[in-house]
Amino acid sequence: MDQVLVVVHMLFAKGETEAAIDALTPAAELSQQEPGCIKFAVHRDVDDPDVLLIIEEWESREAYEGHLKQPHLQELNETMVPLFAGVPRISVSRGLGIGDESKGVI
């Protein structure tokens, strides 16, 4: 299995989260159309509305790395940097498939 799961954890400064969502919306739509994109979902933390998560699933690490070079992602990064309250955390992983195959990997 070459698929990778990417989780981006972002904390925004108070009052900046809606601007971040506005910037993320078109970037997410473009990302979802990229070759190799299986999922690209933006989530908001239930307990802290200034935390957003991007959960991405890519066919391969190479597809994800190609995504990072896209112009819309570069523009998004420039827009988002001043909105952050801290450095985003990015995790790239592969599922271990423990337990029920249908539930053990995202």
Image (spheres, grey):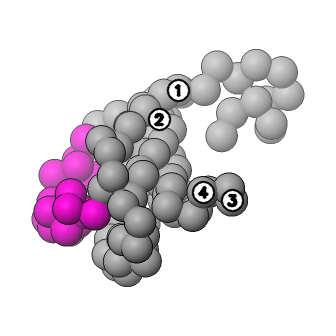
Q: Is any atom of residue 29 visible in this view? A: no
In this rendering, does residue 23 appear at all? yes
Category of crowding for the residue at label 3, using alpha-carbon neighbours closer than 10 angstroms: few (below 14), some (14–19), many (at least 20)? few
Taking the spot 70% from the left edge, 23% from the top edge, the residue there is: 97
The residue that mark 4 highlights is 48
**Residue at x 76%, y 30% (from the top left corner):** 104
Of badges 2 and 3, the one in the foreground is: 3
Residue 66 on the magenta span: yes
For disc 2, the marked residue is 4
Please state, as top left, top right, bottom left or bottom right, where the N terminus lies in the image: top right
| Dominant SS type (magenta) | helix
Residue underneath mark 1: 94
The span from disc 1 to disc 4 (Cα, nearest Å) is 27 Å
Q: Earlier in the sequence, mark 1 or mark 4?
A: 4
Distance Cα–Cα, label 1 vs label 2:
5 Å
Q: Relative to 31, is 87 above or below?
A: above
Q: Position of residue 68 (x, y in %)?
A: 23, 49
> Circle 1 sits in a helix, a strand or a loop, which is it?
loop
Give the SS element for disc 4: loop
Q: Give, as a three-letter code, the residue at label 3.
A: Val
Q: Amino acid at mark 4?
A: Asp
Measure the alpha-carbon separation of dots 4 and 3.
Answer: 6 Å
The three-letter amino acid code for the residue at tag 2 is Val
Q: Position of residue 99 (x, y in %)?
A: 83, 21
Specify few, some or many for label 1: CA neighbours under 10 Å numbering under 14, 14-19, or 20 or more. some
Q: Is there a contact, CB below 8 Å, between mark 4 and mark 3?
A: no
Type of amino acid under label 1: Arg
Pointers 1 and 2 in contact (C-beta within 8 Å): yes
Q: Which residues are magenta?
A: 65-83
The 10 Å Cα crowd at callout 4, few under 14, some 14 to 19, many 20 or more, is few
80 drawn magenta: yes
Q: Where, quadrant-wise, is the C terminus in this rendering?
A: top right
